[in-house]
Amino acid sequence: KAGVTQTPRYLIKTRGQQVTLSCSPISGHRSVSWYQQTPGQGLQFLFEYFSETQRNKGNFPGRFSGRQFSNSRSEMNVSTLELGDSALYLCASSLDGLTAYEQYFGPGTRLTVT
Amino acid sequence: GQQLNQSPQSMFIQEGEDVSMNCTSSSIFNTWLWYKQDPGEGPVLLIALYKAGELTSNGRLTAQFGITRKDSFLNISASIPSDVGIYFCAGPAVLGTGANNLFFGTGTRLTVIP
């Protein structure tokens, strides 16, 4: 089975721009979560989608948004980029049910804001 | 939110040595997960624990779910160079909605000296 894929792997943007990141979950996984990883704050939960609905949201400003499509693929968007948004953005997918907390991560998208 | 503290922060060991690390929380968890992250990649799930006192192995790795439910331990036996990386513990937020939201520990950076 193919793992979680994320595109693009690397991205350089300028302050004030917006960016869209894409994630394809493992086949059969309907839950997709997004995390931000920085040296200072570690791994922090952004939001989770299940069946095209946002089920949970972390403590991030409204500039961070996401969506999920009917095929479970997900995108996240960051508008009005700030220097502090530079981070590794990780997508994870999981089966719902008893093993729902076993999340499988993609390789991440490294975003640099200049 | 919950705080997951890992110790030690970093370890330098000789190849062949055994390694022990732990993770403690201020709150009770009903699931503990251990991940390993290589540079520039996403975390890889190593072991999932579901019951207090549970001891689970995955090859040379053994993890335990502490009986207080506020801690977990990971041991690596006979370390090899490819064990190098950052090890994270993680536990799910208890939301009651089926939503998947993991809190991650601060990480233990392992260096294996050949």
Image (cartoon, rainbow, N blue to C red):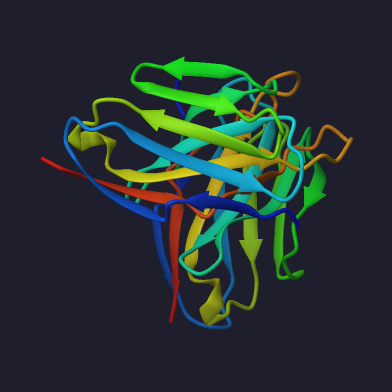
- Location of residue A73 (image quadrant): top right
Please state the horizontal and vertical placement of residue B41, each as a whole percent of the image. Answer: 38, 46
Front residue (pair A113, B40): B40
Q: In this view, does B38 lie to the left or right of B27?
A: left
Residue A46 shows up from this direction: yes
Identity of the residue drawn at 59% across and 71% down: A18
Is B54 left or right of B75, judged from the image as shown?
right
A89 or B4: which is nearer to us?
A: B4
Where does residue B43 sit, x and y in percent of width and height?
45, 41
Residue in view at x 56 percent, y 44 percent: B23
Q: Is residue A32 above or below residue A1?
A: below
Can residue A4 be seen here? The reply is no
Q: Is residue A5 above or below residue B107?
A: above
Residue A113 in percent (x, y) is at: 46, 76
Q: Is residue A21 above or below residue B55?
A: below
How many marks the image carries: the answer is 0
Screen quadrant of the C terminus of chain A: bottom left
Looking at the image, which residue sits at the far right?
B96
Residue at (31, 50) in percent of width and height = B11
- Residue B81, image x and y in percent? 18, 36
B1 or B76: nearer the viewer:
B76
Q: Which residue lies furthest to the left in this view?
A: B114
* Residue at image point 74% right, 70% down: A61
Q: Is residue B88 above or below residue A14?
A: above
Residue situated in front as seen by the camera: A19 or B80: B80
